[in-house]
Amino acid sequence: MKKNLIIFGTRPEAIKMAPLVKEFLKHNNKFQTRVCITAQHREMLDQVLSFFEITPDYDLNLMKLNQNLYSLTADIITSLKPILEEFKPDYVYVHGDTTTTMAASIAGFYSGAKICHVEAGLRTFNKRSPFPEEVNRSVVGSVSDYHFAPTKISEQNLRNENIKDKNILVTGNTVIDALQFSIQKVTSSTFYDKEIENLKEIFNPNKKLILVTGHRRENHGQGFINICSALKQIAIKNTDVQIIYPVHLNPNVQKPVYELLANIDNVELIAPLSYPAFVWLMDKSYLIITDSGGVQEEAPSLGKPVLVMRDTTERPEAVEAGTVVLVGTNTEKIVKETTKLLTHQELYHQMSALHNPYGDGKSCERIVKFIEQL
Ligand code: UD1
Ligand code: UDP
């Protein structure tokens, strides 16, 4: 029996790895699968585990308030050693580009396991943007044995780095597997979610909803000040608009956002939402303004235009398809592009055309089949 250790630590990794955990557990006659969480995130990770009903086998419980990259990286590597030595996995699975991903891939490599990288091959070719993710995913790419690329573009990036074709599989993005699971669960007659009920109290169906999220490290400081200034102008100028912003728990985000945007009538600052509640709100939105990677992939599936508050993206597919526009953190540009989408119906309809370049919901099945035949 092949032994799998699936390691993750932050909210987006958990959302995108949850369907893989479930798929491997369906095949427990062939695989012994264990889950290890670093808990680089705590509350935001626990929200996801609870929705997907995943109980980790190991919980390193590493998050510290306003943690730094140096000690987090070191703590992850040292805390994984005893687990890797005791369980001796054949395969270690990591996702994407966080500090957990990078440190766990190195630890797994030290243990002698084969490293399997899910969401492999994304690149901006700018090592400072996103920071530190671009370097994290390049490091993971170089220690990985198997690369599960979400799209043809990410596959080509890996080929350009001389990764052999036989070690790359284009799978689609597992976020679509997660989204489909979530929509199915939320729409079942027995499902009740207190957060969705609370949101119904806040959400104003008579206004156009602009949903906002943001957290990127390279936007901390002046970037967030510019973003908040743009949101304030949009809210004040457009009284027919409601902005709902579930604010990331990072203190570098909480502080400017609550200082600059509290007490504006049509701006609702709320705590991070559970995954189903966030999906519910995305579906209700008119447009989304975000710097998130995952949200850029989900929104086109729901037919929602996205303005991305970044200068670079490793997800060019939706930009090429015209459903995503990069606006950076320039206040004027954010206001201008938002105003265009609020006033030009034709442009809005072009951008909201349903287009999903990121997968068909079967990515995890493909990954499991690939590992089965090794
Ligand atoms: C991290 C990842 C980023 C990913 C993002 C997803 C790194 C370097 N960054 O950024 O790639 O896109 O997660 O959201 O890996 N906090 C809480 N509770 C939580 C989560 C965070 O209080 O549940 C606070 C803590 O004070 C923590 C801080 O946020 O120290 C920063 O968390 P960290 O994971 O280091 O950075 P993120 O900005 O969340
Ligand atoms: N998300 C969530 N609750 C929220 C905001 C986002 O569940 O309040 C989900 C969202 O649907 C997406 C993921 O979190 O799947 C994105 O996480 P984040 O933006 O923190 O990280 P990134 O994708 O940029 O790495």
Image (spheres, rainbow, N blue to C red):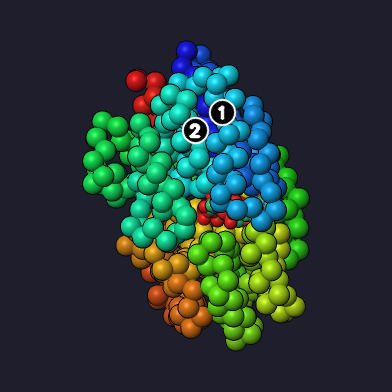
Q: Residues within 10 Å of mark 2 (few under 14, many from 20)?
A: many
- Which of the pair 103/354 is nearer the observer? 103
Q: Badge 2 is on which residue?
A: 107
The answer to whether any part of residue 206 appears in the image is no
Which percent across, then down, holds residue 98?
51, 48
Relative image position of residue 22 (x, y in whole percent): 55, 30
Residue toward you, 47 or 215 = 215
Helix, strand or loop at disc 2?
helix
To which quarter of the image does residue 241 belong?
bottom right
Residue designated by label 1: 81
Looking at the image, residue 319 sits to the left or right of residue 105; the answer is left
Quadrant position of residue 316? bottom left
363 in relation to 225, above or below: above
Near mark 1 (Cα within 10 A), the count class, few <14, some 14-19 or many ≥20, is some
Residue drawn where x is 73% and y is 66% of the image? 202
Near-viewer residue (10 or 367): 10
Q: Disc 2 marks which amino acid?
A: Ala
